[in-house]
Image (spheres, rainbow, N blue to C red):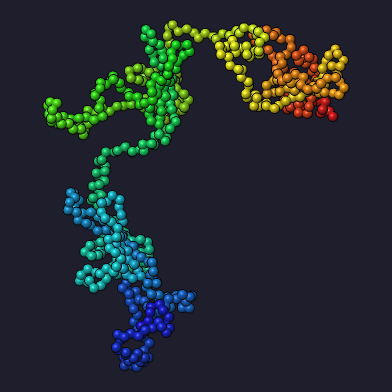
Amino acid sequence: MLRIPGMPFLPGTVFRDISKSHYPKPQSLMNYQGISMLSDRKPPGLVDASGFVIDPNCPPVSVPSIYPPKIGPKLPPWLAYDKQVLCFNAYFKETLQEVYQAPYQVRKVKILYYLEDGTMQVLEPKVENSGIPQGCMVHRQRIPKPPPCESDFISILDLNVDQTIQIFDRVYHITSCDKFTRHFLNKSGIPVPDPVDAPTDPTTEMRKRADGKATITKEKKHPFAQFLEFDRMVLKFSAYWDDRTEFGDVRRLEVCYYLSDDTIDIKEIFPRNSGREGPSTFLKRSKLPREFGGIPLPGEQTPQSLLNVLGTSMRNVRYVVDPLDVGRKDIIFYKDKDLQIGSVLNVYGRAIVLTDCDEFTQSYYRKRYGIEDFTPAPVPMRADDCMPSKIKERILPPYNGWGTYEDSEGNCLSVEPKPPQADFKKFIQLDRFILRYGAKLLSTIKENCERVFIVSYYLSDDTIQIYEIAERNSGFLGGEFMKRTRIPLPGQEKFTSRRPQYYQPYNFYIGATISLKDHIFHIVSADEYTLIYMEHHPQEAIETYLISIIPLSRR
């Protein structure tokens, strides 16, 4: 009868062996040294390729076993050793015929032995720039032993540290194993020696010596690395060009060095009343060469050199491009380390002397090059330079009575006068801020003394508007008494060149007597908003604060 390994002994899982023709009866008695006795010997168990005894007729135990440890039935190998692999490190020598001074090369591999079915696999780890196809060298399979034992397969007893094994006409020498392999072999009763060192590879040594002799190349940077690191960073220097010839002068310059692309531009600073006009660009932005030997002639400098290889006259002449570029001359440009206070720059034949720099430039050189001395250099002056004269205040003619004072000043300052500009900042801050006061008119006429007015003061432009409150049977019409306008303080000279002083908020308070265009008003009250405003701004009307706010606080 045939039984499926790992399946229970039930109908449907047992099959008849049609190849079996001999059916001996089991013996229960035996004769041992002339004595008949009961036979209690067990049949021999099955042995796998690795030499371990297993029982494939016994199903796996999926529930807690009732047997003591190491006494119950054993599991099949495909289940007992599932996903358990023995790993050995080994090497083999490969003969080289084309390489001088390297008769062979050492190639390191890993030998994997799968315990579940006794198969083996040989892998070679990939090495960068080795030039050898690496990876799986022997696929997973059962590997036969070399002759004359080719009928047997390599088992676990043939693999151990510091042993040589032949796999398909290639000899491997095992040097070490991993921790799991060493523990498994020791547990199985197989002693494992200490790891051994693999021999050095001659080709690797040659490659190391060749790399040591090679010249050290500079690390290549991204073309935009400098731009991204130093974008919008400019080193600014103050400089001068001493051009004191017969009609020359000392030119004040500003030198800007752009760290993003190592370019330089120079601008000239024109002093006042120098008579110079036009653009201030002294040198447009470009890389500045350190050496200048004059302007080259046309055709003297070319991007490529040509060689005449055939012909002596103008006809039948052949030219080729010089691959070595022998006639090329490298141009050295100014860098940030060449710019310091006191250094002289050769700007196409002109000697530019650096005298000072700004704070960012000082911090840059202090951090980059460790420079601490930034004392400004002296600037020469011409002998006939005169001291700058003080600007005298312009005296305007007196006011003639036409228009406002601002209009008269505009006619005197320009041929095409512009309208006077208001204080826009004050207008934005104090727009719709109005102080309203109740006032009475002081007059020798008795009827005028009974009239009631509202005086409005606009803080945005210091204008004043007066409105009269109409009363029944008074004989006076209410409404606008005086349009909104600025009113100067009384007692000032009118026809003068100076602007008069106008009424301010501190001139208005309860109890004050003011003269507005020949009318005398006496302020008797103020609205609630005006009192709150004066309370929060006592510095603008201290008298109003003392006279009006303190009585309210006593209530």
Q: Is residue 14 above or below residue 141?
A: below
The C terminus lies in which quarter of the figure?
Answer: top right
Q: Position of residue 148 (x, y in %)?
A: 20, 71
Quadrant of residue 76 within the rendered picture: bottom left
Q: In front: 16, or 129?
A: 16
Q: Position of residue 391 (x, y in %)?
A: 55, 9
Residue depicted at 32% across the width and 63% down the height: 112
Q: Is residue 338 above or below residue 408?
A: below
Q: Position of residue 333 (x, y in %)?
A: 33, 26
Q: In front: 130, or 288?
A: 288
The N terminus lies in which quarter of the figure?
Answer: bottom left
Q: Position of residue 33 (x, y in %)?
A: 31, 91
Q: Is residue 122 above or below residue 201?
A: below
Q: Is residue 90 above or below residue 62?
A: above
Residue depicted at 26% across the width and 43% down the height: 211
Q: How many marks?
A: 0
| Residue 87 as seen in the image, left or right of residue 487 | left
| Residue 474 as seen in the image, left or right of residue 159 | right
Q: Is residue 340 visible?
A: no
Q: In front: 496, or 204?
A: 496
Quadrant of residue 450 within the rendered picture: top right
Q: Is residue 433 visible?
A: yes
Residue depicted at 36% across the width and 17% down the height: 351
Q: In front: 113, or 542?
A: 542
